[in-house]
Every structure is written in C-alpha cells, then in structure tokens.
Image (cartoon, rainbow, N blue to C red):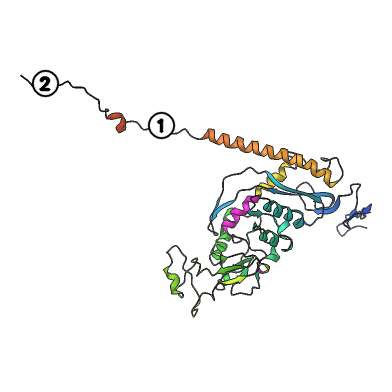
Amino acid sequence: MTGTDGTVPKPKKPAHKARVLAVGTDGRNQYTADRDARAGHRSATNSRSAGPFVGYELHLAVQARDVKWTNYIDKTTMSDEVPGVITCLALVPAGTHRGRAIVDDLVAAKKAGAPIDDVVWDPGYSLCKPDTTHHKLAQARIHQTFQPVSHQRGIRPFSGEALLVDGQLYSSLLPNELRDLPMPPRGAPEAVKVEHETKFNQRARWRMARHAGPDSDGATRWRCPFCAGLLKARQFPTTMRRPVTVPLVPVDEGRERCCAGIITAMPVELPWWQRIPFGTTAWRLSMGRRQVVESVNAALKGTFADLSRGFFRVFGQTKMTILLGFTVAGYNLDRIRSYRAKKRAQEEAKPAQPKRRRGTWQEIVEPATTTTTTDTGPPT
C-alpha cells in the first residue's frame, strides 16, 4: 500500500507488553528480578524520549541561600553564599507519590532541628494535592516558593471581602486590568520578562498584608493594602497622611471605605499562598535559588558520578540506599572543599589595604621635648 505521495509507509511495530513476574506487598506489579523496583514514567530530555521505565526515583533536598530581605515587589536580598550540599534524600520505587516521598522527611528534619524555613521546588511537587504537600509544610512553618500551573492560577472563590488571585489575597478594589495577567513565554528575552513583571509588580501593591497568625488551627488574619499603608487614595482621607513614597492610586467614585475590617482566612482557602506574590521581580529572584538543585542533578548524572543504570549492582531498596548514602557523603565533601577553595581564592584576590596616610599632624609636628634647667640662684 502506497500513500498519496507514492511513498510506502513504515509498518507499525507491535505493542510490547511487559511480563508481570509478581505482585508486591504494596499491590503494584513487579517486572524485574528486583522485588522493590516498580514501573514509572519519566519526562523527555536531550538524550532520551519520554516513556515508562522500571527502577527507582531519587528525591533530593539541597541547601540554598535564604531570602534575607524583600519588599515583596521588585527587590530581594539573599543571604551569603552557601555550599550546595545535599541535606535530605529519599530513594523510592518509581511511580511513588512525590509529595509523600519527600514532604514527611522535610517535616521530620524540621522537627529534629534542621533550619528549614523555605522550600523552592518545581511543579512536579507543587502539582500534588495540597493535603499531601502544601498544608503539611505550612503546618510545620515551612514556606514554599513555586510556579503555579494553569489550573492553579486565576481567580478563585473566597468567603471574605477580598480577591483570591493566583493563590494570593488582594483587595477587592483591584483594577480589572491587573486581575488576569499572563506569564512571559518560556525562553523569553530579559526585556520581555521585565515587561510582564511590571504588571505583576503593580498588582503586588494591592496585596492583603498578613496581620496575625497562623494560629493553632492554621487561621490567618489579613488587612487591606490601604489599612496596611501600602496604598493611598483621595477617596480615603486618612490614607493621604502616608509618606510620598506610598503610591497614590485611583478608586471608583462613591467608595466611602476601603474594606470592612480585618478578615480571617482558613488554611483550606489558601492552599497555594506564597510569601512573595507570584510573578513579581522579587519572586523571580527568589525562585532562581532552585538552580542549585539542577547543578546537583547534573553532578550526579555525570559530572561527579553517573547514577544511571549499572552504577549500583545490587538489588533492593535498602542496599541501594546504603550505597547511595556513601556517594552523597562523598559529593558533599567535594562541594565543601570547592566552597572553601573558592572563598580562599576570593580572599587572596582582594586588593591590598591602602597604605597609611602620610604628611599627617603626627608626622609634621615635632613631639615636645623635655628640657632640664638648673637654678643657679639669684644674680649677684
């Protein structure tokens, strides 16, 4: 059979169905001699296409810099540079729920005294249901920084007098042109990113400010931006006493009050809330800390060691985890040595201290000399 252009189409390969050797204690099929290995799906890369695989998945928590200060709009100050060591890991069978694989370990590490204040992760984790990821971290007082996907964005219903947009609470007076903002396309140049971020930065000034909480139930209390001193309007005379640095915004005529007072939000209403409003320049700078884990993944895929098929020649999740622990310990030592060498090189490259000033008063004024006199008595 030939096509319309005269070419002979290639015959389709018959679908290959994997043979099930057994069913594990977790109710999932076993396809290989390794009783703990399971089937999962991996995304496409430059060297392979997407598709199913049988084996394990490694979840890593890598140390990154903290957000030292931010104005929640366009400025973010990071703490000093830290070595990108692996602080927590979880080796689980492929196809395991990603949230349950690492979130419980992060919460346990927080309770054990680890200084975990913020988690920056990709949509592979933030896509999970809030009760398995977001709420557990929030209950442990761990903030989250992530990029919401399409179904997590937009306006969501909220019980109080506020707008819930992209997981963040905003004033009900938020202009319509700032409610539904698009993100810049992937790989866009810096000028396009800045153009899109300008709108997000303007919207961030309309955000509700946290007044108190969360309490033991997770409830938080919020104030509108006019009461919190983030905005001022001529319709609300008391806000005009704010400094000149506070933006003056137009408000619809006839409005006698900016809000009905402090509102209370339950945690179920704010599953995707972030401390820094999504889409702003400050959020992008904070989200950029995630690049450190990509460097670790590249190191464990060839730069430092190649944890591909055949690296661990043993069967079983326990045995592989033990061997992986030694590998990670060696990687952490390598990162610490590299960090210290970099700091040492920076110290040596610092310019020499300027010489002491010359021609000062101390040099040009002669010190007072002590003279000794002898009294010879009155003259005769």
Crowding around mark 2 (Cα neighbors within 10 Å: few <14, some 14 to 19, many 20+) is few
In the depicted structure, whether residue 356 falls above or below residue 172: above
Toward which corner of the image does residue 326 lie, by quadrant? Answer: top right
The image shows residue 236 at horizontal and vertical percentages of: 46, 74
**Residue type, label 1:** Lys
Task: Name which quarter of the figure residue 177 lies in.
Answer: bottom right
Comparing marks 1 and 2, which lies closer to the viewer? 2
Give the position of the N terminus as an image quadrant: bottom right
Characterize the local packing of mark 1: few (<14), some (14-19) or many (20 or more) Cα atoms within 10 angstroms.
few
Residue 283 forms part of the magenta stretch: yes
Sequence-first tag of 1 and 2: 1
Position of 311 compared to 189: left or right?
right
Which residue is found at the position 65% from the left and 47% from the top? 63
- Number of labels in the image equals 2
Q: Which residue is mark 1?
A: 355
Q: Is residue 303 visible?
A: no
* Residue with the mark numbered 2: 377
At label 2, which amino acid type do we have? Gly
